[in-house]
Amino acid sequence: MSVGHNVGVEIDGKGPRYARPVIVMRKFSHNAFFGVPLTTTGKENPYLYAFSLNGVENKAALSQVRVFDARRLINKMGYLTIEDYAEVQRQLVDIVMRPPQ
């Protein structure tokens, strides 16, 4: 999808369309959904969840979740396994509900 140009620490896309893969976590309406951007780079940290999609190692950037407009969607890359999707959900809940340190 076209995530646009970053502001500050936000993850941005690449190329002329600022494209980046995103996991669609929850559809809110025909026009909006909650998504998690993916990256293939980055060191181990508690806000990255590693998995394989279409034979490529990806990491879900859990600290970069946000609501996206469906008009940003470009094409579908594939589906996560049920286990990976459930683990991304579990880690998101854990991050949001964990008391601040």
Image: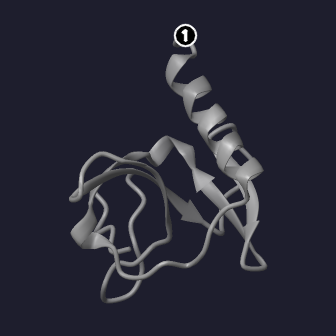
Q: Does residue 81 lie above or below 4 as drawn?
A: above
Q: Does residue 29 lie above or below 93 as drawn?
A: below
- How many C-alpha atoms fall within 10 Å of the one at disc 1: few (<14), some, or many (≥20)? few
34 or 2: nearer the viewer: 34
Quarter of the image where the N terminus is located:
bottom left
Task: Give the residue displayed 33% in from the left and 52% down from the top.
Answer: 33
Q: Does residue 66 lie above or below 56 as drawn?
A: above
**Could you tell me residue 81's position as x and y percent?**
73, 59
From the viewer's perspective, is 54 left or right of 78? Answer: right
Task: Give the residue displayed 42% in from the left and 59% down from the top.
Answer: 11
Q: Place residue 71 in its image quadrant.
A: bottom left
From the viewer's perspective, is 2 left or right of 100? Answer: left
**Could you tell me residue 23's position as x and y percent?**
51, 59
Kind of residue indicated by mark 1: Pro
From the viewer's perspective, is 85 left or right of 35? Answer: right
Q: Is residue 37 visible?
A: yes
9 or 3: nearer the viewer: 3
Dot 1 corresponds to which residue?
A: 99
**Could you tell me residue 41's position as x and y percent?**
65, 66
Task: Give the residue displayed 25% in from the left and 54% down from the top.
Answer: 32
Provide the secondary structure element on which disc 1 rests: loop
Q: Place residue 58 in its image quadrant.
A: bottom right
